[in-house]
C-alpha cells in the first residue's frame, strides 16, 4: 500500500519546511517537494496544515486498579490517543505478588494484542521486591523492555523501593543498557501529614494537596539523584511538578549526571485551586496539582532543556469513580485523563502561548521520548526508513474540549469547556490511517508491541 501526503509543512525537532511524504509498506519511502504519486497511491492533501511525527506518550496507565475502580482499558485508551495524534504509548507491566517481571510483561502483551489502535511498549515495574530475582532486569532488557519504574512511596501496596533496592536497580540497569525511572516523593513525611490531617477530619481533595507539599518531591528527587550519581547510572524522573525538583535536576546536570525528566500538561496548566471546588476530587492525582508559582519553573525547565519530555501520566477514571469517595481523599482513585489532549494543549498553550517553538513541541513530545526510551529512529521523527507514524495537524482549527470529542473511557475531562486553537485531524500508524478527517477509520487490531533497545541515545539538553 502506497500513500502520498502532499502540500503540508513538515515540522521536525530541528526544522520545518514544505514537502511531500511518500509512504510505502508502512514506512517513509521519500520526502521531497512536488513528489509524483506512484501508480495506485492514495493521495492526501495536507495543504494549509502541519505534518508532524506521531506523538509518543511515554507515561500512560492502562487498566490500573485503585480501590475497586479500574482505569481505561487498552482499546479505549488507544482510541483516545489516536484522536489526539498519539501513535505510540508506553505503559506499565506491574507484577502481582509472587509474579516475575517476565510473567507480568507477557500478561500485559496478551491484554493489549488485538485491542490497540496504536503501537505500545512496556515499562517493567520494580515492585514486591521479595519476589525479584537478580537477573530479571537483564532478562527484561534482552526482551525489549529496557525501562523500569521504581517508587519511593506506597509501601503498603508493595510498590516502594528501599534506598538499597533502588541503588541495586540503578547499578544493574546502568551496566546493561537499561533505564530506571522513579516516582519521587518522601513517604514518611506524607504519611505523617496524612495521619495529622485525618485526626483533624481534614480529608477533602484540597487536603490531599496539603498532605504532599512541594518539598516532599524536591527532597526525594535529590535523594534519588545522589544514588544515581554514586551508581554512575542514568535516571529518569517522572511527572516533575515542582520548581524545587527542577532546581535539583539542574544541579545534578551541572555535576555531570545523566538525568532525564518529564512533566505533564496538568502541572503546566492547572493549579491546586481546582481541588477546592465542588468537583475537586476529579482533579485529584499524585503528585497533586501545585500552587501556580511552580508553573513558571516548569516552563523554564522545558525551555532550558532540564525537562526533556512532556507526557501525561494518563490514568482515566469516570466521574462516578472519582465522586464515590470525594469526602476522603485516601479513597479517591488518583489520576487524570490526558492522552487525547496532550498535543493540542501543548500547541495552544506552549507554541501559541509563546513558551516554545514548533520544533520544541516535536522535540519534547516525539523525538526525545523516542531517543530516551529506545524507539529512535524507528519512531519519533520524519525520516526515510522510519515508521510512517504521522499526524496531520490543523493549527487554525478552533475546538472546544468535551469528553465526547476525546472518544475515551471517561465522561469528564479536566479541560472540559476549554477552547483551544489547533487540533489533530488525521493520524497514521505505520502507514495506516486510524483517524482521517477526525473520523475513526482504523482497526483496534492494528497496534502491536514495540520491542525497544538502546535507551538514552542522545544528550537530553538539545540546543533550542
Image: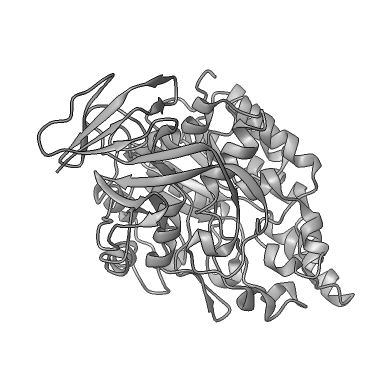
Considering every residue shown, the one lying at the far left of the view is 39
**On screen, residue 456 above or below 432:** above
Q: Name the quadrant containing residue 196.
A: bottom right
Picture residue at 81% right of the left edge, 60% below the top: 210
Considering every residue shown, the one lying at the far right of the view is 200
The figure's colour scheme reads one colour
Picture coordinates of residue 316, whole percent (x, y): 54, 65
Picture coordinates of residue 251, whole percent (x, y): 66, 27
Picture coordinates of residue 185, whole percent (x, y): 66, 53
Q: Name the quadrant containing residue 442.
A: bottom left
Q: Nearer the viewer, residue 31 or 158?
A: 31
Q: Is residue 245 left or right of residue 273?
A: left
Picture residue at 50% right of the left edge, 22% below the top: 462
Q: Is residue 356 left or right of residue 26?
A: right
Q: Which of 132 and 417 is in front in this view?
A: 417
Picture residue at 60% right of the left edge, 65% below the top: 154
- Residue 225 appears in the figure: no
Quadrant containing the N terminus in the rendered view: top left
- Residue 433 appears in the figure: yes
Q: Which of 383 and 263 is in front in this view?
A: 383
Quadrant containing the C terminus in the rendered view: top right
Tell me how many marks there are: 0
Picture coordinates of residue 228, whole percent (x, y): 52, 38
**On screen, residue 91 above or below 304:** below
Picture residue at 85% right of the left edge, 72% below the top: 202
Amino acid at each position: 500500500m502506497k500513500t502520498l501526503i502532499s502540500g503540508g509543512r513538515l515540522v521536525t525537532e530541528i526544522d520545518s519546511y514544505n514537502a511531500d511524504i511518500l509512504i510505502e509498506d508502512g514506512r517513509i519511502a521519500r520526502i521531497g517537494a512536488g513528489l509524483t504519486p506512484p501508480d495506485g497511491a492514495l493521495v492526501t492533501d495536507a495543504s494549509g496544515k502541519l505534518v508532524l511525527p506521531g506523538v509518543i506518550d511515554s507515561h500512560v496507565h492502562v487498566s490500573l486498579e485503585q480501590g475497586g475502580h479500574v482505569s481505561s482499558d487498552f482499546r479505549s485508551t488507544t482510541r483516545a490517543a489516536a484522536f489526539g495524534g498519539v501513535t505510540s504509548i508506553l505503559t506499565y507491566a506491574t507484577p502481582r505478588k509472587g509474579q516475575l517481571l517476565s510473567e507480568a510483561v507477557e500478561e500485559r502483551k496478551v491484554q493489549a494484542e488485538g485491542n490497540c489502535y496504536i503501537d505500545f511498549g512496556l515499562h517493567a515495574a520494580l515492585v514486591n521486591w521479595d519476589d525479584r530475582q537478580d537477573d530479571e532486569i537483564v532478562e527484561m532488557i534482552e526482551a525489549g523492555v529496557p525501562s523500569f519504574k521504581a517508587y519511593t512511596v506506597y509501601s503498603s501496596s508493595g510498590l516502594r523501593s528501599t534506598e538499597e533496592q533502588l541503588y541495586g536497580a540503578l547499578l544493574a540497569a546502568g551496566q546493561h543498557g537499561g533505564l530506571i525511572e522513579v516516582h519521587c516523593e518522601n513517604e514518611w513525611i506524607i504519611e505523617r501529614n496524612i495521619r495529622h490531617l485525618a485526626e483533624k477530619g481534614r480529608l477533602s481533595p484540597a487536603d490531599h494537596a496539603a498532605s504532599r507539599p512541594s518539598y516532599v518531591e524536591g527532597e526525594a528527587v535529590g535523594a534519588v539523584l545522589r544514588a544515581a550519581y554514586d551508581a554512575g547510572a542514568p535516571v529518569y524522573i517522572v511527572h516533575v511538578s515542582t520548581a524545587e525538583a527542577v532546581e535539583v535536576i539542574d544541579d545534578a546536570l551541572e555535576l555531570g549526571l545523566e538525568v532525564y525528566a518529564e512533566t505533564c500538561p496538568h502541572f503546566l496548566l492547572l493549579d491546586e485551586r481546582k481541588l477546592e471546588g465542588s468537583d475537586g476530587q476529579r482533579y485529584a492525582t499524585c503528585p497533586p496539582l501545585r500552587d501556580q508559582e511552580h508553573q513558571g519553573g516548569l516552563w523554564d525547565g522545558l525551555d532550558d532543556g532540564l525537562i526533556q519530555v512532556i507526557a501525561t501520566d494518563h490514568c482515566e477514571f469516570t466521574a462516578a469513580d472519582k465522586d464515590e469517595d470525594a469526602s476522603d481523599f485516601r479513597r479517591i482513585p488518583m489520576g487524570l485523563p490526558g492522552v487525547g489532549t496532550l498535543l493540542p494543549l501543548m500547541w495552544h498553550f506552549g507554541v501559541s502561548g509563546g513558551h516554545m517553538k514548533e520544533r520544541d513541541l516535536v522535540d519534547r513530545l516525539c523525538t526525545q521520548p523516542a531517543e530516551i526510551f529506545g524507539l529512535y529512529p524507528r519512531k519519533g521523527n520524519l525520516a526515510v526508513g522510519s515508521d510512517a507514524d504521522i499526524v496531520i495537524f490543523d493549527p487554525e482549527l478552533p475546538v472546544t474540549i468535551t469528553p465526547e470529542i476525546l472518544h475515551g473511557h471517561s465522561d469528564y475531562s479536566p479541560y472540559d469547556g476549554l477552547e483551544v486553537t489547533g487540533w489533530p485531524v488525521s493520524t497514521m500508524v505505520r502507514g495506516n490511517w486510524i483517524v482521517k478527517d477526525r473520523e475513526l477509520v482504523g482497526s483496534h487490531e492494528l497496534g502491536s508491541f514495540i520491542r525497544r533497545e538502546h535507551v538514552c541515545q542522545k544528550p537530553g539538553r538539545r540546543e533550542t
